[in-house]
Image (tube, coloured by chain):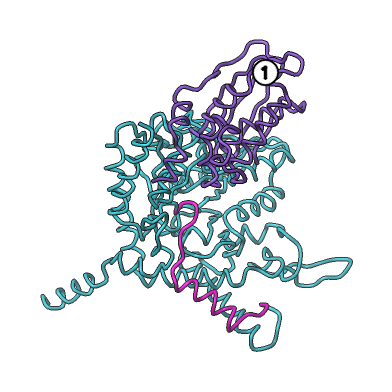
Chain colours: A purple, B cyan
Amino acid sequence: MSALRELYQEVILDHNKSPRNFRRMEHPDRKVDGYNPLCGDHYTIFLKMDGDVIADISFEGAGCAISKASASVMSSMVKGKTKKEAEDLFQRFHDLVTGEADPTQDTGKFGRLAAFSGVSEFPARVKCASLAWHTLRAALETNEHRVSTE
Amino acid sequence: MTTTRDTLLQVEAEKSFDVERIRAEFPILNQKVNGKPLVYLDNAATSQKPQVVIDAISRYYLEENSNIHRGVHFLSDKATQSFEAARRKIQRFINAASQKEIIYVRGTTEAINLVAQTYGRRNFRQGDEILISAMEHHSNIVPWQMLAEEKGLVLRVIPMNDRGELFLDKYESMFNERTRFVSVVHVSNALGTINPVRLMISIAHSHGVPVLIDGAQAVSHGRIDVRDLDCDFYAFSGHKMYGPTGVGILYGKEHLLEAMPPYQGGGDMIRTVTYQKTTYNDLPYKFEAGTPNIAGGVGLGATIDFLNRIDFDAAIQHEREVFEYASAVLPEIKGLRVIGTAKEKASVHSFTLEGIHPHDIGTILDDEGIAIRTGHHCAQPVMQCFNIPATARASFALYNTKEEVETLVKGIYRVMEVFE
């Protein structure tokens, strides 16, 4: 049960149950849909930008606990951050869920992201955890309106 | 007199189904997953293969491998005989009138595409209508959509009720002078519904419309008699009936197949080729361009030998008892909603748990050694019908047991415990 408990940590269960910034945004500057055709998870991410800074972020949609908690944690972490800072967080998150980084080595570096360290033991769930982050990246960097993890 | 009767009864008793003996023939079942005995309940995706099928494929490559229908040498003759003997076994298994009606394909998907691209392309005109049902797998939607787009056809969908049963009165009222074809699933992979295809075929025939039955989920859960059904085409895959992947069958009535143009061009499907004109081979070879999956065909033949040897009827009966046990105990779990509650069902139990996404259910059950499928099951319109993104699906085969149902139930309680 330990790997499973590592995956479904309290932080994840809490964010799944009460996701933060889980609302539709009126008049967003950017709005991008993210979709995982494999399991049907889909989220829409709304952004309000202040120059290079993410002034506000919200999301709506549906998916598994991992994908929803990831979107929720991400939204609470990137608010007020610059594009570059958000990109750095994405990189750290990516290294964490793909098992390339060890959060026990440098706890300060990961903060709340550390809750997703258990994902690396479940390769089939990496896409769930990454969906919101890929969607955010698309919203920040491209003109695409729909991204997919496939 | 009494003695004879008793002897007969005894023989029957000896032949009765011993699930442990059957399980022993499927080596893959005897393993641990995450430290727990494997409980394989993803049979609707693909079933496991008995040792005799694995051996038949291996023996083919060890002793007979050669190309078929062309060589004069010993091995070519042997390979051809094995491949064609398998075709006859398949013919008898589904009670087709002739081996000319048994076309080897890659699987159900290719069988449906073949009919769409040959029969459909030849016979359908702009404005013609094709009927499919609201519970089709993508493989019985998309080939028709592609053809409809190309030729300006109208694809009409037979609706279903909230139990997952087709409205037969509405089906009957959908026929008009433009209706050209019906293509429906026999057993739904997402809901488990067994459709009354015999009746649906006779309704279609009364309007002069031919019918294709997608039998992918049906062949391993009941006896199929294509002549009794009177279907015009019947499509199924080897791998869902304890046989190998990459081989399947299209059954078609001989006079329809005769009149259809070939599907793919190439070797084996021709009689003569010049740069001016090619004449085509006889049935069934006309539809079998290129070197087929010979080992797959031989393996499928061995699968049918296996099903005949173990007493397929008793196996179906056993599976039905396990399935009905699951039907009884699963709905007792608080918060569990069964998706698809048709009166006539087979093999498949789709369900959701309140507040828990199917993907999470699948991961936690896997930790208990239980393999189920989660997602939309290649039937997104079905999910839309029930207004859900996905389901968890446990699907049963002849080697499953009541004990495994109990393990599943315990696993589901474990899922709820994690999310408490």
Task: Name which quarter of the figure residue A144 lies in.
Answer: top right
Q: Position of residue B374 (x, y in %)?
A: 48, 42
Residue sitting at x 71%, y 29%: A138
Identify whether B166 is placed above or below B290.
above
Is residue B314 placed above or below A65 in the rendered structure?
below
Q: Position of residue B288 (x, y in %)?
A: 67, 65
Quarter of the N terminus of chain B within the rendering: bottom left
Left/right placement of residue B10 relative to residue B96 reads left
Instruction: Name, please, the residue furthest toward the bottom.
Output: B74
Which secondary structure lies at badge 1?
strand
B276, B412: nearer the viewer: B412
Q: Is residue B58 magenta?
A: yes
Residue at point 57%, 65% (across, down): B102
Q: Chain of mark 1?
A: A
Question: How many circles with numbers are drawn on the protein?
Answer: 1
Looking at the image, the residue that sits furthest to the right is B276
Q: Please give the range of residues in magenta.
A: B43-68
Amino acid carrying label 1: it is Leu
In this rendering, the answer to whether B209 lies above or below B305 is: above
Q: Nearer the viewer, residue B37 or B124?
A: B37
Q: Which residue is found at the position 40% from the left and 60% from the top?
A: B32
State the image coordinates of residue A11 (x, y, percent, origin top left).
Answer: 46, 29
Q: Nearer the viewer, residue B376 or B200?
A: B376
In screen coordinates, is B276 left or right of B342? right
Q: Quadrant of residue A3?
A: top left
Question: Quadrant location of the C terminus of chain B?
Answer: top left
Above or below for B29 versus B305: above
Q: Which x, y percent locates residue A12? A: 47, 31
* Other residues around mark 1 within 10 Å, as few (<14) / some (14–19) / many (≥20): many
Q: Is residue B51 magenta?
A: yes
Q: Which residue is mark 1?
A: A47
